Amino acid sequence: MPPIKLLHLSDIHIGSGFNHGRTNPETGMNTRLEDFVESLSLAIDRALDEPVDLVLFGGDAFPDATPPPYVQRAFATQFRRLADARIPTIMLVGNHDQHSQGSGGNSLGIYHTLAVPGFIVGENIATYPIDTPNGRIQVITLPWLNNATLLTRPETEGKSMGEIQKLLIDKLAVVLEDEIRNLDPELPTVLLAHVMADRANLGAERFLAVGKGFTLPVSLFIRPELDYVALGHVHKHQNLNPNNQPPVVYPGSIERVDFSEEKEDKGFVLVEVIKGSAQWQFCPVDPRPFRTIRVDVAKEEDPQSVILKAIAQTEITDAVVRLLYQIRPDQLDLVEAGPIHAALGAAHHYTIRPELVSQLVRPRVPALNANNALDPLEALGTYLDHQENLEKDRAALLAAAAQLLAQG
Ligand SMILES: [Mn+2]
């Protein structure tokens, strides 16, 4: 059998980060919407060019479940190209796609309702056999879990987050086992999951990690029955099971959603899967660069020129830039806004944030600071040297101190 080709992308979050863009006068659209469309269209182009047998979208289409219509249209226009090309596509529901913790439906459900040919919306834990030109493949979908997914109200009542998490992992293990047991053992198999996965084992401390939803141990997914594990949720591209079968891959987001992703590569993943193995490669897109210029001018005599030099040393053309500089309040008059704005002009978008640092409390006697290990009498002598009004008592005070120390 030839391998089955998959394109795996995730965390599109189209419609976010508008505060880093500006209105394109030609289109009336925010430039960041256009950037996200550009990156998404590169992934779809690749799916059509190959062509792949199946597209897996790992969830989180928009910043939230109720995007404005023009953002929905931008997203749908790209995915429509897959439907037109008859490329089967599974769209998994991520946490950002769920409305009211899932009780209000999800932003991808409309593709299910409209029965878009070849499209499956992964709203539940289920297994889908999919026929492709290169044979049949089966995909288990695991959408974002919340309290209501596998647990009933009485089961969770009065329980701590840690206890609920443990209960949920136990239930999930059973449900997943059930899906795996019902697989056709002859077919290549993929798990598509929107989860926060952790390499840690099922230690007790795991259940205490409260906060951004459930963290699942990656060991749940490292199974010989699975040939590739396609994840979504974490925006940094990574493989959680390197050098082993199956690859457990986060493709990451397709564009930089915010400055926390400044240093991350962005892209999607192409996979060739046969029963028992998967070859995959990360395909980078060319996301708009983000640059942080951080400079401390609190000790500088000419803060303006230091700031301008830091800007000149940074590649800012067409980048989203933030300039952060630390400065003392009494230096503020030394910084002129005009030239700094001019120097940042080549950036696509920039913000300037001065951080005021309070003046350090200077030791009143410079020779007396924590770094100088003086003996007590020497320290007192140094202190008295700087106290003019005590000059006449100097000898008496030193003598009294010497006596006290001798008694001690
Ligand atoms: Mn997510």
Image (cartoon, helix red, strand yellow):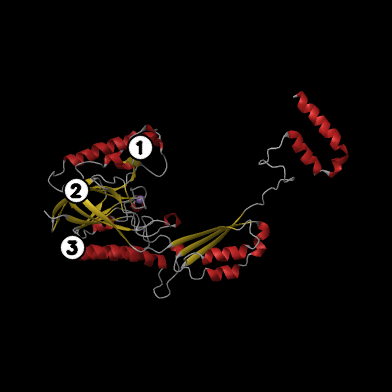
Q: Amino acid at mark 1?
A: Gln
- The number of numbered discs placed on residues in the rendered structure image is 3
The disc placed on residue 86 is 3
Crowd band around label 1 with a 10 angstrom C-alpha radius: few (<14), some (14–19), many (20+)? many
Q: Which mark is residue 277?
A: 2
What residue do we see at 75% from left, 37% from top? 378
In the picture, the quarter occupied by the C terminus is top right
Q: Nearer the viewer, mark 1 or mark 2?
A: 2
Q: How far apart are the alpha carbons under marks 3 and 1?
A: 40 Å
Vertical side of 212 occupied by 293: above or below: below
Q: Amino acid at mark 3?
A: Arg
Element carrying mark 1: helix
* 305 displayed left or right of 362: left
Specify whether residue 360 is in view.
yes
**Nearer-N-terminus badge (3/1):** 3
Numbered mark located on residue 52 in the image:
none
Q: Which residue is mark 1?
A: 165
